[in-house]
Amino acid sequence: MLAILAAIAVLGPLGWLWQASLLPGTYSMMDMGYADHGGGPHHQMSTPGRSVTSLTDTTPGAPDVALTLVARKEKVRLASGREIDGYTLNGSSPRPVIRASQGQLIEVRLVNESVPGGVTLHWHGVNVPNAEDGVAGATQDAVRPGGEFTYRFRVTQIGTFWYHSHQVSHEQVQRGLFGALVINRPGDASLDVPRLCTSTTGNAPSMGALAACRSPRHLAARSECG
Ligand SMILES: [Cu+2]
């Protein structure tokens, strides 16, 4: 009897906690209803809210690196020779590498020619003004077919980065909408990345894990290099 009571004493609260932790059958985004300040002190905002679209790079002057990327829905030929229904930027996937030096101003005009679900470009790991971050639904609306959006930001870091669509990413990235961005230290050629490879897994271009590859053996092991 004691053992049963002990078991109830232990399992009862656990069962209640489990039940209480379950998601309800339905819930509404509208029920949130309050500002979550994250537990810190509440400061009265002294200035009115600012739209994320106004958080841009205001540096004047002509860009050091300027290009247009045209996104299309079309066949993509894999290294195996097989063609898949995919997406391209300027007719290729991955798109050829964008190179810049630290401190330079980059301007990329993204044109959506025929990607039905809309498209954006997110600069993965690159510190950019919020309005240039390319997160559909958060920092900008997706660029619809026939539309365009210009990203403009000054690169402050050094390294090998990649960029990719941030709209329906699970499908658009896997099927080709990505490329690499290499930012070098000005005047230091020893840090240059001579070639970049894209790892491909499964039946389609994968999440685009990019790696600098310097040896012929490494090059041979990967499927897409450029
Ligand atoms: Cu990313």
Image (tube, helix red, strand yellow):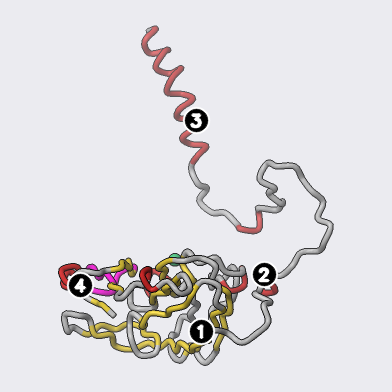
**Tag 1–tag 2 contact (CB < 8 Å):** no
Q: Distance between the residues labelled 1 and 4?
A: 28 Å
Q: Hey, what amino acid is under mark 2?
A: Val
223 displayed left or right of 178:
left
Residue drawn at x 21%, y 75% as measured from the top left: 223
Single out the mark in the foreground, 1 or 3: 1
Residue drawn at x 51%, y 84% as measured from the top left: 65
Single out the mark in the foreground, 2 or 3: 2
Residue drawn at x 53%, y 86% as measured from the top left: 109
Single out the mark in the foreground, 4 or 2: 4
Q: Distance between the residues labelled 1 and 2?
A: 24 Å
Q: Name the residue under label 3.
A: 16
Q: What stretch is highlighted in magenta?
A: 198-207
Q: Position of residue 68 (x, y in %)?
A: 48, 89
Q: Which of marks 1 and 2 is nearer the N terminus?
A: 2
Residue 219 circle label: 4
Q: Is residue 125 magenta?
A: no
Ligand number 1: quarter of image: bottom left
For disc 2, the neighbor class at 10 Å (few under 14, some 14 to 19, many from 20) is some
The rendered magenta stretch, by its main secondary structure, is classed as strand
Q: What element carries label 1?
A: strand
